[in-house]
Amino acid sequence: MILYRDQLVERTEIHIDIEDRGYQFGDGVYEVIRVYHQQPFYLDAHLERLKRSAEAIEINLPYGFNQLKVKLAELVAQNQLVQGNVYLQVTRGVASRTHHFPVKSEPILVAYTQQNDRPIQALNKGVHTVTTEDIRWLRCDIKSLNLLGAVLAKQKAVQQHAHEAILVREGVVTEGSSTNLFIVENGQLLTHPANHLILHGITRQIVISIAEDLQIPVKETHFSKEQLYQADECFITSTTMEVCPVIQVDDREIGRGQPGKITRKLQNAFYQLIS
Ligand code: PMP
């Protein structure tokens, strides 16, 4: 079953209009929410971010948080989802094709579940990455359906047999194509400030607060590709990748090609949260 507007229906019953603005313009916003033990993880934070993204592009969410939470709980229960993701998107709706906002259109919400396991091998061994120019627009803080910049970057990574593309804008490392990025330098965590150039990741925020609890200093600051190459440790974070060690960037090994100690501490603390 999927959630279409405020109804749970069979996926095959739903047809998306060819003039849905999400389909034609990427005119909408989305969230990916992790489900552990049948429970959505940090659901409030995801809904708050969905609301912020929608407001930034002047879409009114069609349902309040309470109603949405009830519907999402029904969606998870109906699909007997124990571990996996909920994908949720809201588009500006259907209207005759013009670039500007239509005078009348009703936002359309769709959500569905995907069963999948935690990425255990990547979490244990770490992943390879490549750097590439960050060619995305200047509102990366909006979780918009327009993902071509990320799609092209990730494709480049896959073609080079890497797991993630690390984006660099004017010499500054911003984030991964679908992850936030941290390095460890002299015992301190560095990550790009949460401004318009990155998505304000929920996992990023969780990691920052775990680090504070563990008295690991965190600095939200710019750092260069050279600093990334020279980092003692590096890891990426996201709802689906959790806290994942990076052991190679381009042709440079990070931390002698092994996940670092601070990364492991943060992974363990994160694991406590989801257990
Ligand atoms: N940055 C980008 C560009 C992303 O697409 C994502 C995944 N949504 C993240 C960071 C990580 O965000 P979160 O921890 O909220 O999944």
Image (cartoon, grey):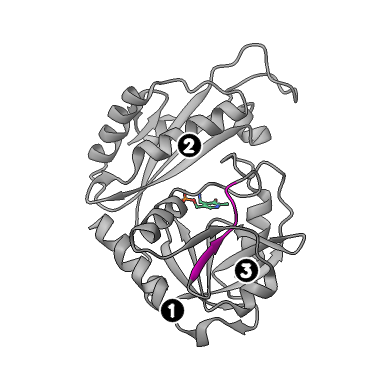
Alpha-carbon span between mark 1 and mark 3: 20 Å
Classify mark 2 as within 8 Å of ligand 1 or not, answering yes or no. yes
Residue under label 3, please give it: 157
Q: Position of residue 151 (x, y in %)?
A: 63, 55
**Label 1: few (<14), some or many (≥20) within 10 Å?**
many
**Magenta span covers which residues?**
188-194
**Label 3: few (<14), some or many (≥20) within 10 Å?**
many
Name the residue at 44% across, 50% down. Answer: 205
Q: Position of residue 78 (x, y in %)?
A: 24, 37
Please determine whether, in this image, residue 185 is positioned above or below residue 200. below
Residue under label 1, please give it: 259
Apparent side of residue 234 relative to residue 229 in the rendered image (left or right): left
Residue under label 2, please give it: 49
**Label 2: few (<14), some or many (≥20) within 10 Å?**
many
Please determine whether, in this image, residue 187 is positioned above or below residue 144. below
Name the residue at 39% across, 58% down. Answer: 212
Q: Nearer the viewer, residue 13 or 198?
A: 198
